[in-house]
Image (cartoon, rainbow, N blue to C red):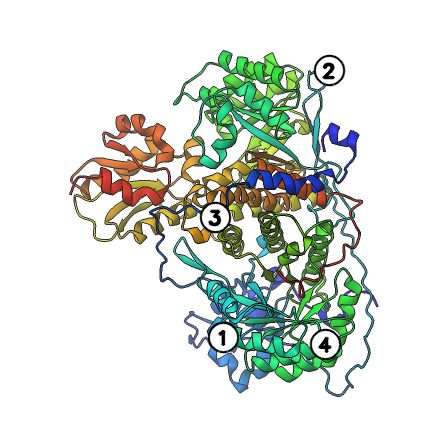
Amino acid sequence: MSNAASPETTRKKSIQKISPIDVYKLLPKTNCGECGEANCMAFATRLVNGELVMRDCPPLHTPEYKKAHEALSLLMAPPVRAVVIGTGDTAITAGGKYVLWRHEFTYHNPTPIAIDVHDMMSKNELRERVAAIGAFSYNYIGRKLELNAVAIRSVSKDPSTFADTVKTVAGATPLPLILCALDPAVMEAGLLAAPDRRPLIYAAMEESWKAMADLALAHNAPLAVFAPGDLALLRSLVRTLLEYGVSDLVLDPGTCADDGLAETLSNFTKIRSLACRQFDELFAFPLLGVPMTAWTGGEISEDVLKWKEATVASMLMSRYADLLIMHSMDGWVLLPQLIWRFNLYTDPRKPVSVEAGVKSFGRPDKKSPVLITTNYALTYFTVESDIKAANLDCYLIVVDTGGLSVESAVAGRYFTAESIAGALKEYAVENLVDHTTLIIPGLSARLSGETEEASGWKILVGPKDSSGIPQFLRERWHMA
Amino acid sequence: MTQKDKQNGPGNEGILNLAPQILELLKGVNQLELENFSMEIGDLDLFIPSGGFSSPAPAPAPARPRPTTLIREPYTPVMTEYPGKIREVTLGATKSGGGSRGSTVTIGGAATPAYADRVRLPPHRPVISLDVFDMPVSLPKVLKENVAEVMGQPAEWAKMNVEKFGADVITIHLMSTDPLLKDATPADAVRTVEEILQAVDVPIIVGGCGDPKKDAAVFTAISEMAAGERLLLNSVTLDMAEQKTLESVAMSAKKNGHVVLAFTGLELNNAKELNRRLYEYLPPDQIVMDLTTVALGYGLEYSFTIHERARYAALMGDTELAHPVISAATNAWAAREAWMKMPPVYGSRELRGPIWETINAITLLLAGIDLFLMMHPAAVLTIRDVISRLENPKAALHEPVADWVGVRL
């Protein structure tokens, strides 16, 4: 038998092909309104668009609709299963992907990033590193970006040493754990040291699958399957483990940071393509990428290793990794990963632009400053986030530039003296304040002369980056 | 791949040399910069769109006994064939081709999504162009350090880019022609490009100022002067079509044997519309596309997805999108995270800046970019190294996965 889908799975539809009617047929059709929608058809439409989830329909979860619930679960199940690691508020979900390409729908469950520790570290080192993992965060357009898990490696190969380390780490952080030990005896000691934490077990291999499967079943924990560079073995292990009764699996086809990088990317892509295109049930699991393999290369400088790890991590994130294990804790390595992850997992169906108009922040009065920017969503949210963070009282005019950023809109002549003058007039800004001074973005500085002529307003050239607005207003705004 | 590369063969030298070179470039940047600056960490909720559907587990059959040995399953690689193929476009012309370049560069030709299958490599490697500006410009400190000595001397700058940083192509940005800046004349611009052509013998990209009328005048004059050189004119736009200047540039490019860069802003219908207009004047193999590159953190995802969509549509047979694409990876420096001093936990900007440009480029490399416009030498080296690793057919078939679990770090 080849890896072609079985008759059962060929009946499965991709998310783009599921129509609201398919869903409607399985709903209670009572138009009860408990979901907040006008009727069941409206609910079906929003469910298909990914705007609502099955949980939003309470009657569906009653015994009366048990059969319909099962059928709908099957219909709506993503071709890549979602696997939960950890428990409670900090639990992470890996996988749950509906599509191969982001533009086909949207990607779900942003790739959790785990940072490693190992069992030859002292208790103090462990506590310090674990605290740093939990504390690392970045405020990006009003969102807090963070790391998500701790991977504990067995370096000593000694069960009790590993158990001690797991115990220390588990006591020091609520974050989900990944236990990395290739010897089942060591793994068992680790699992016993973190009861009820539902850690990911890393990993079942050709020689160890049975012992690891027993541990996964005994501890109700998800299991990673490690078959480096051998997709047939990976499939064999998955088939065997499924038959054995372990179904929360995570796949590691191996990450190579050097000459094997091409094969790594190729394997990730093939696995995900087969899962999403052919509904291949043996590849229908989240993928684990391990950028920290870059550290085993023995380069002469740590900065070079970190550099390599950063590039491999971002490539794997773009190429279908649903979970990453990294070693570097440097901000310059992690920041681009956290931001790229946030961006990659936004909904591409959402417009690039925000509505044009005048926004007010804080409690502006007649003497408050008036700023202007473009309606590109990320430009607007960046400016908004900077204004809010500094608690400024001001008006912000948002010009329709067709969703272009300031720099592109100036170059493409969407943000011009005329469009600025037009916006001032259209939104009757002269009625909002009793001055006629407008602050334009620093990146549009060259429009200042023309704009003064076209609008009759006095133009102040603001900072090139909106992070400079608070300081700019302190130094240059003297209306109050 | 450049002609030069072809002669030398796709060896591994780049890989071996990378570490010391990167090290050199990053030397002395370990000190963290502390400044009187703090970031507000908001107390806002983390926004994670969630699938929300629990996937039912494939019910394990309880009646069957548990397996005691491994059940062998085969794996048959699926080779997806695509009906479409990206056109090949050559930049630069040697003496025999009617120009004066020492080497030419051919881009495009892809028949599969980028790096989806390691055994099916595109016929040409992506190439790297380094930027030169024709007047002093304000640059982030980390970029300026490398080019301060040649700022304002475009010919010297171009030479340095080729000799020191190994540029495959040079882009000369004629900023001074901007009517809102120096308003330099087309004749001034012609002189600058002549100097560049004399200073280096790689293919040249000529960048305008973005004003559709001025650019048309400048491009037409340069096109005449450099007849036969197969320049890439960066760029032509729908704005030019509206201002009725597109025809003059396209006709001049055809007559004098140049290539045009069709620039549109993250909108595939516009990209197709502009190409259709250009087909009226130019053969399709004289058109390259710029679909817009946005900085990481400022909308890179829009660029990533538009490139994936364009490439996939082209491979599925949309010939209006089957052109090679370029990316201005230097746009990465628009992100504040690339140039700003930040608290020590986020690292020094000497590392953050170049990694930002690197990740911007590497992300779009996976979406199918054929030519990058770049600036920071460490980013250039890394992209070149990654490309050589991804496109080296002789690379170890199965590099053993290292024992990362047991390694003591």
A205, above or below B315, in the image: below
Rendered position, B284 above or below A233:
above
Q: Residue at x 43, y 22 (%)?
A: B178
**Tag 1: amino acid:** Arg
Q: Are marks 2 and 3 in contact (CB under 8 Å)?
A: no
- The answer to whether dots 2 and 3 both sit on one chain is yes
In the rendered structure, find residue B297 and report the number of the disc placed on it: 3
Separation of residues labelled 3 and 1 (CA atoms): 33 Å
Callout 2 amino acid: Lys
Front: mark 1 or 2:
2
Q: Amino acid under label 3?
A: Gly
Asked if residue B181 lies left or right of residue A266, the reply is left
- Quadrant that contains the N terminus of chain A: bottom right
- Quarter containing the C terminus of chain A: top left
State which tag comes first along the sequence, 2 or 3.
2
Tell me the residue that label 2 is attached to. B95
